[in-house]
Amino acid sequence: MTPEGVAGRLAALLGAGTVVSGTATVDVERTRWVDAVTTVRDDAELDARFFDVLLGVDLLDEGFEVVVRLWSLTGRHAVHLRTRCPRDDARVPSLAAVFAGAAWHERETAEMLGVAFEGHPGLTPLLLPTGFVERPLRKEFVLARREEKAWPGAVEPGESTPNPRRQPLGAPGRRR
Amino acid sequence: MSSGPPVPPRSRGVIALLEENCTVCMLCARECPDWCIVIESHTEDLPPLGPRGRPRSRNVLDRFDIDFSLCMYCGICVEVCPFDALFWSPEHSYAGDGPTALVHEREQLRDWMASVPPPPAEDPAGAPPD
């Protein structure tokens, strides 16, 4: 099915559906999150029963976005479902009961982005050291390695150290 | 120099530096996402070539280090170099006994040039040159 066709079917099922970067995408309220994913999974026409990935995005003032990508093995098309939660209320219902494999992805997203997945069987940390309370994928997280080391690109041709009188050249990622 | 089984074409083992081609433009150091290239240089004045000429200055490389303990082998530095001073070498057996052993200085980067394979033959099915 083409992305446009999938988006049309999403609109019929959930009342919305667009094509974003070549993939049919639907934004749903977090109160409808589990229902929406279940509806897409169980729809015979879409047949998107393969759970591909779940991830979180830090949208700064617009809160956090949780994206799930489903795939149809028969139709060879993808469906992206997205939901948002505010920064000060970072909670999203868990999809672990819809796709058992989503539990692992939600554990990682909870650990790295600090989004709590309500109804998850156990959000135990996966990768970070014990006692690590920071959320590394949040935009405000400061990468210590980038703070302690000077950017090598600040040196101009013909220099060994950056000229202190010149306006410093910002390192990539700090130019905002 | 190489040991072990042969590696496929275009393998990314280590980055070699052809110093003669480097103009110290700093592009590789600035594009490197891992900040693993450190370059130092100074400016040298050249006398005028003729009686009506004027003195020129050029940048002379003092230091060119690549820290392979940070490098993620993305190859952006090789791609971005406008003067073909950086090359991929398939040489990959350079383990050291500590992170500092993976900082390759300019002499070592030059030595890797010997292991850089010749460019692949032109693909007869490829697009014609501009």
Image (cartoon, rainbow, N blue to C red):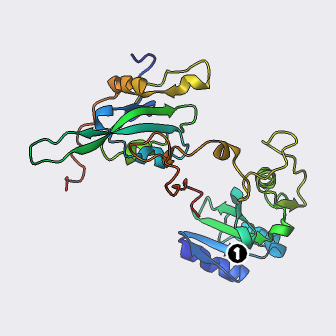
Q: Is residue B48 left or right of residue A139?
A: left
Residue farthest front in this picture? B51
Judge from the rendering whether residue A19 lies leftward or rightward of residue A67; answer left or right.
Answer: left
Q: Front-most of B2 and B112?
A: B112
Q: Is residue A157 left or right of residue A90?
A: left
Above or below residue A98? Residue B115 is above
Identity, as a three-letter code, of the amino acid under mark 1: Asp
> Image height check: is A81 above or below B111?
below
Residue A23: give x, y in percent of width and height. Answer: 57, 68
From this view, report whether residue B129 is shown above or below residue A131. Answer: below
Q: Nearer the viewer, residue A73 or B96?
A: B96
What secondary structure is marked by label 1?
A: strand
Visible in this render: residue B69? yes
User: Would you say A17 lies left or right of B56 here?
Assistant: right
**Neighbour class for label 1 at 10 Å: few (<14), some, many (≥20)?**
many
Residue A81 spot, x, y in % from top left: 69, 69
**Residue situated in front as seen by the camera: A69 or A160:** A160
A21 vs A142, nearest the viewer: A142
Do we see residue A40 in this rendering?
Answer: no
Identify the residue at image location x=38%, y=35%.
B10
Image coordinates for residue A22, horizontal then vertical, percent: 53, 69
> In percent of the image, x 70 and y 75: which residue is there?
A27
Residue at image location 73% in from the left, 54% down from the top? A141
Q: Residue at x 87, y 47 (%)?
A: A124
Spot occupied by residue A104 in the image (x, y as percentages of width and height): 79, 49
The tally of labels here is 1
Residue A79 lies in what quarter of the image? Answer: bottom right
| Residue underneath mark 1 | A27
Q: Quadrant of the C terminus of chain A?
A: bottom right
Circle 1 chain:
A
